[in-house]
Amino acid sequence: MSRQYQYYYTLIRWKNNKKSSEIHVELVITGDKDVEDKPHSGPPHKATTPEVIAKVKKLVSDNLHITTRGLLNLVGISHERVNYILNEELNMKKICAKWVPYKLSEKISKIMLEFQRNFRNSKSGYQNIITDNETWMYFFTVSSKENNKHIVASKVVPESTTVNSRFYVNNVLPEMFNNFMKKRDRHTVRDALLHHNNATPHGAKIVTNYLKDQYVKLALIPLTVQT
């Protein structure tokens, strides 16, 4: 039984104050064992026509980041019908979204202020910042990313490989630094600012010593702060 039919089945039980066993007995007596919805009188859903479904599909294909509110405004159907068409007819779900904080906490505000003070008189500005992280991701490039953000290195870790501090030092950081130097036309990563989160491998002593040997500093940016 699909999710939609389960919903109607539960609703009928609640309105008629009947147990599921009572409904089952009635179905057996009448010889009707099919619990799926059957054709009934009344107008069909005008919003779920092939034309409307095709229009929704085209809008989503043209803009993968379109919202359900945007679809209902453009197509002129209800929010419930938009969700039905996306989930049931087109078998779609949202897998890529960008979230931004609408309000900074006092702790993050202070760190951000200190960060801006440190860079106010810097000649290099943001040229020396390297952002690093490990993540599970879809191979999908979001078109709305800022143009000044670039991936200087990406590495697919072999299956069943543990990303510990030693792997981080021996495999991830050297390749990332080499790509950074090529992109910036530099011969060293000295005075570069590494921006990574507080994952366990990142804070290990072997990583700290490696960064110290390379004269790489850590950038204290609010994205690494947990509140």
Image (cartoon, helix red, strand yellow):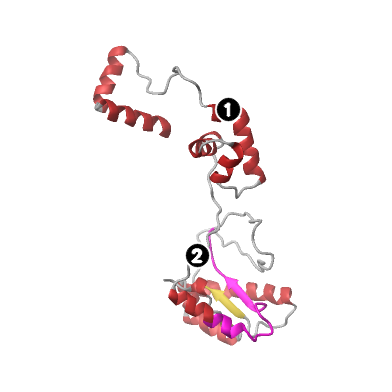
Q: Classify 10 Å Cα crowding around label 1: few (below 14), some (14-19), many (20 and above).
A: few
The residue positioned 56% from the left and 75% from the top of the image is 195
Residue 31 placement, left or right of 80? left
* Three-letter code for the amino acid on which mark 2 is drawn: Pro
Give the residue displayed 61% in from the left and 74% down from the top.
Answer: 130
**Relative image position of residue 48 (x, y in whole percent):** 55, 29
Real-space Cα separation, disc 1 to disc 2, in angstroms: 39 Å
Q: Is residue 129 magenta?
A: yes
- Residues rendered magenta in the picture: 114-136
Q: Quadrant of residue 174?
A: bottom right
Q: What residue would you read off at disc 1?
A: 49
Q: Give the position of the C terminus as an image quadrant.
A: bottom left
Helix, strand or loop at label 1? It is loop
| Image vertical order of residue 155 relative to residue 42, above or below | below
How far across and down, in percent of the image, does residue 17 sit? 24, 27
The amino acid type, in three-letter code, at marker 1 is Thr
Where does label 2 land, which residue? 101
Residue 76 percent coordinates (x, y): 58, 36
Helix or strand or loop: what does disc 2 sit on?
loop
Answer with mark 1 or mark 2, whichever residue precedes in sequence: 1
Quadrant hosting residue 20: top left
Query: Which label sits on residue 147?
Result: none
Count neighbours of disc 2 (C-alpha within 10 A) and say few if under 14, some if 14 to 19, many if 20 or more.
few
